[in-house]
Image (cartoon, rainbow, N blue to C red):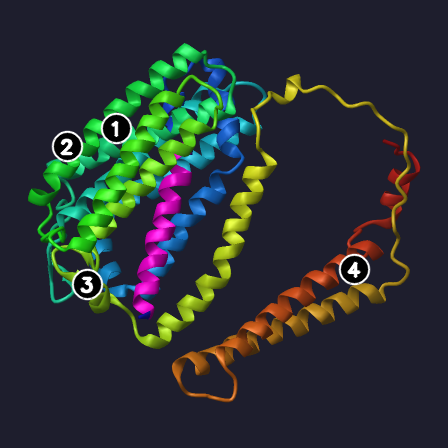
Amino acid sequence: MLEYASYALVLFSLGMYVVLDGYDLGVGILSLAARPERRREYGEIVATAWDANESWIILAGVVLWAGLPGAYAVVLPSVYLPLIGMLIAVILRGLGLEMQSAADGYRRGWALLFGGASLAATVCQGLVLGAVLTGPHQRNGSFQGGAFDWLSLYSVLCALGLVAVYLLAGAAWLQDKTEGWSRSGVRRTGRSLLVVTAVMAVVLGLLLPSADPQQLQLSQPARAVLFWLAVVTAVVAGAVAWYGFGRRPDWRPFAAVTTMTTCGLLGLAVVSAPVVVPPGLTVHQAASPHSSQLFLALGVGLCMPFVLAYNLYAWRSFRGKYTDPGERPIPPLHARTYPLAVPTAPSGTARTILRRTLLVMLGILATALSQDVFGGVADWIGPVGVTVLGGAALAAWIVGDRRDRRAGYFHADVADLDGIGAGTTS
């Protein structure tokens, strides 16, 4: 049953990526049609969380590689070219975003690079999705097709559909985060994109049975009920988004678009499970051994709360409308002196080095033990013990560094700090 946990983790990670990174890719594409003075603003909005959003696709790739290596071995060779194109576009997109953010004022080249790379990454993702849905040519668990098998009419339509979905999510996000659009402009753009997205969803849904070599499982009552429930929920969410564009509260369209996207992904999973790669590679056939599944479930299960917490923290920290930093009111200054702590003796640095060395050795020991535990060789320490050791090492490191920071051991030059502290008030 652990293989189905890995399958669920892959679906969850991909769903989180589509929902979260989808809106900032959509904002990037929309920036291509925006006025030059608005492009920098769009980039600053995306810069608050784009790196956290993209972490989900890395997590999905790790789980697919370790938990479902059979699917990984078939899918990856079949989409090498669009996948490499997507990675290059993601790198260029981050470069354009960070360079524009660091520049003084608007830089047309970096802004266009950010928008163009966002469009290229979205198109490549749609081509990969279409190639997976149409079923890579495989034999005995290995890819037997050509370098351009991913290119088909259905994969091109998937790319166009994904661009429409991301544009819709980006428009809904901009309504929630900016004040630059007029209400009529938001309504017109959002509703137009909603119509295009609905048309593409219907077209792709009708063409899926003929494009997908897998026999879709809608004859079973439970599957049919879940599928049509997802469809009805998506339609209701679409109606809410239609009404919400251009009206307050501004967060309502984005919540509705997120619900629509989630329902679409769930509906696709309902009609295809347990097949992971059409036409017949199932979860059980593609799964790794039980020991690897156990190691993966514990490792990813421990990382998942931290990734979610990081996303939630970023969302909470940058909630509300975007404000140009140059237009923010400057708070009144209060004269106050901040004393700087000075290390009393060099022994504190040696103690820090010794503690960190011991913690690294403890981590190596925990890793070595985990190889025996999850490989079924040793039985004197269980997975819980390995988890406790790793958590204790991390906690000791953090607590020790916080104590040393309060004691002043992280100050590189005490004389310079003394000079700064003597003449600095704020």
Pointer 4 or 2: first along the chain: 2
The residue type indicated by label 4 comes to Arg
Residue nearest the observer in this picture, 268 or 290? 268
C-alpha gap between disc 1 and disc 4: 54 Å
Pointer 3 or 2: first along the chain: 2
Residue 198, how many percent across, how many down?
A: 23, 28
Pointer 1 or 3: first along the chain: 1
Residue 52, how many percent across, how many down?
A: 49, 44
C-alpha gap between disc 3 and disc 4: 52 Å
Tell me if label 4 and label 2 are in contact, CB under 8 Å. Answer: no
Q: Secondary structure at mark 1?
A: helix
Q: Which numbered tag is attached to residue 197?
A: 1
| Horizontal arrangement in the rendering, residue 193 relative to residue 132 (left or right) | right
Residue 78, how many percent across, how many down?
A: 19, 51
Residue 27 visible: no
From which residue to which does the magenta span run? 2-23
Pointer 3 or 4: first along the chain: 3
Residue 304, how many percent across, how many down?
A: 48, 56
The residue type indicated by label 2 comes to Val
Q: Is residue 174 magenta?
A: no
**Image vertical order of residue 234 relative to residue 199, above or below:** below
Q: Which numbered tag is attached to residue 203?
A: 2
C-alpha gap between disc 4 and disc 2: 61 Å
C-alpha gap between disc 1 and disc 3: 30 Å
* Residue holding disc 4: 403
